[in-house]
Image (cartoon, rainbow, N blue to C red):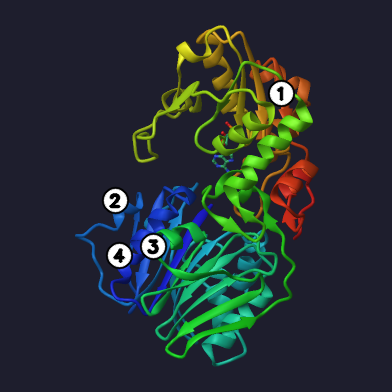
Amino acid sequence: MCGIAGVWNVDDSYNILHDILLGLQHRGQESTGIVIEGFKFLKMQGLVSQVLTKENYINGRSGIGHVRYSTFGENSEIQPLMGLTSKGKFAIAHNGNIPDAKIRMKSLVEKGAVFNTTIDSEVFLHYISLAPYSDPKLSIQWSLSRIPGAYSIVILTDSMLIAARDSYGFRPLFYGKFKGGFVVSSEDSALTALGAKEITEIVPGEMVIFSDMGLDKVKFATTKMRFCAFEYIYFSRPDSNFYYGNVHKARFKMGGILYRESQMTGDIVIPILDSGFSGALGFSLASKIPIELGLMRNRYLGRSFIMPENREEIIKRKLIPIPQVVKNKEVIVIDDSIVRGTTMKQIVKMLRESGAKKVKVGIHSPPVIGPCPYGIDTSRKNELIANQKEIEEIIKEINADELYYLSIDGLKEAIGGDKLCLGCLNLNYPI
Ligand code: AMP
């Protein structure tokens, strides 16, 4: 997963990109990259605060940026990508995954194209170059219309900034007004924190063009709307708001509906911080079972810290039980999701070792049974515990006393609609 940002026509775009990307840091912690007006760039492994330092300052009034999650690559693999095309120079930052990118790349290579990276969005640069127009804007429009998804994208040229979302709107993207210019971000919360005004969600299938002429919008594909349910379940910040509303509120409802569906009983509700917190609050309110801090989270263990390879060890260092809270209690642990099962297995073990009488598990999403081809880094199919095992077997594997997941209908009810991509939950993939 990744976060993308853009700035158009505002002084000090470097620091503005810094602030937006910092607000999107949860979407990617492995590398940070920016391209500023004049195609001056800075791309490095590391967190925003480690890369966009005072010493590295670049002057300019426009730019795009990217934070990346999940893969370790060479510096050349860090976005934004840049390329000189037949329509001029472009910089691109992309959130999402193009499922058939390899096929598209192969067909372009067979026609003589040369790729510098394995990043999906390099395909866009080639399409822009090949588009049957001389105008860069029309060439971008043509290129976007040829790829159904999944992308939210920012493109910088020497005369404009373009922000676009594929017609399914799998990934989020927003823009707002700021100090006489414009700012763009994957999540609105990063723009709200900045003080941007008139924050607007980009309509799927639409590109928004910021230039000296102001703002213009062009529809390049019919809006279908299949927003990623996992953005609501886990990925986005609780203070972010999408088409169906606020993320925290949706997670809170997921927790409440999980209680309604499961009728679990216990002495205390323990949230798995941070992403399980809103759901646990909702569960606690609905069940009237008090919420307690049974597991503390060490917030200072970042990805940059030298971590042991072993995931159990990482979880042990990250989540620390408080025996005084859990001893002799029937505890209900609430988390947002189970992917491989490693986290929950370790949590149940730690709670038992800390004296919990019973450990029951409530998950405020349905079982993850399929991988995500659209940019969420869930594991391969055979690593997904719910793809491989029935509920009873999962209960045994994680050594819990009980396990309940939210139903798919419950999830839709909590989010408030069904124009969602639920591919990883029901194997119904829109593309
Ligand atoms: P696992 O140990 O593989 O079952 O991972 C589940 C835990 O990872 C849950 O606590 C989630 O909050 C978190 N999680 C869910 N999806 C992702 C993802 N795509 N990337 C990183 N963490 C995730």
Q: Earlier in the sequence, mark 1 or mark 4?
A: 4
For marks 4 and 3, the one nearer the N-term is 4
**Residue at image mark 3:** 194
In terms of sequence position, does the residue under pointer 1 or pointer 3 come before the other?
Answer: 3
Residue found 59% across the figure and 87% down from its top = 138
Going by the numbered disc 3, the residue's amino acid type is: Leu
**Label 2 CB less than 8 angstroms from ligand 1:** no
Q: What residue appears at the point 25 percent right and 73 percent down from the top-left corner? A: 59
Residue at image mark 2: 50
Q: Quadrant of ligand 1?
A: top right
Tag 2 and tag 3, C-beta contact below 8 Å: no
SS assignment at label 4:
helix
Secondary structure, mark 3, is: helix
User: What SS does tag 2 mark?
Assistant: helix
Residue that badge 1 annotates: 403
Residue at 51 percent across and 59 percent down: it is 187
Does residue 138 appear in this view? yes
Q: Which residue is mark 4?
A: 15
**Disc 4 packing (10 Å; few <14; some 14–19; many ≥20):** some
